[in-house]
Amino acid sequence: MTAMDWLARTAPCGLVALSMDEVVETANDTFLEWMDLPAEEVIGRPFMSFLDPASKLFYEMRHAPVLRLEGEARDATLT
């Protein structure tokens, strides 16, 4: 494991990578801890399934369009 891999895995913020259809492909240890789920129950699930209703709306209106246009979104604060 590289230093960068370790930093991403143990970052104090939740980090996830999504497929083009918004399914979780990877998640760091912090995100898994917040969800209180093992990786096997997070990977392969739609990202939206982890969000509360207000965050779903915010994600759909703000972050999803950015992801589709730019291929990445940064600094998302969601519940």
Image: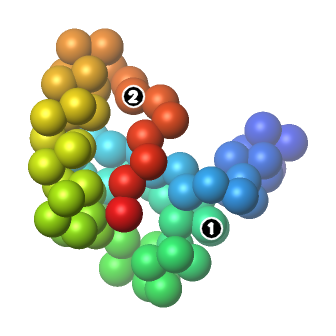
Residue 74 in the image: x percent, y percent? 47, 30
Figure disc tally: 2
Label 1 belongs to which residue? 29
Disc 2: CA contacts within 10 A as few (<14), some (14-19) or many (>=20): some
Q: Which label was assigned to residue 74?
A: none
| Residue occupying image coordinates x 23% and y 43% | 59
In the rendered view, would you say 52 is above or below 15?
Answer: below
Q: Is residue 13 left or right of residue 77?
A: right
Residue 47 in the image: x percent, y percent? 26, 57
Alpha-carbon span between mark 1 and mark 2: 20 Å
Disc 1: CA contacts within 10 A as few (<14), some (14-19) or many (>=20): many
Residue 46, can we see it? no
Residue 24 or 58: which is nearer the viewer? Answer: 58
| Residue occupying image coordinates x 50% and y 35% | 75
Q: Is residue 11 left or right of residue 39?
A: right
Q: Given the current orientation, which residue lies at the most extreme front position?
A: 54
- Dot 1 falls on a residue whose secondary structure is helix
Q: How is the image coloured?
A: rainbow
| Residue occupying image coordinates x 23% and y 31% | 62
In the rendered view, would you say 1 is above or below 39?
Answer: above
* Tag in front: 1 or 2: 2
Q: Amino acid at mark 1?
A: Asp
Label 2 belongs to which residue? 73
- Dot 2 falls on a residue whose secondary structure is loop
Residue 58, can we see it? yes
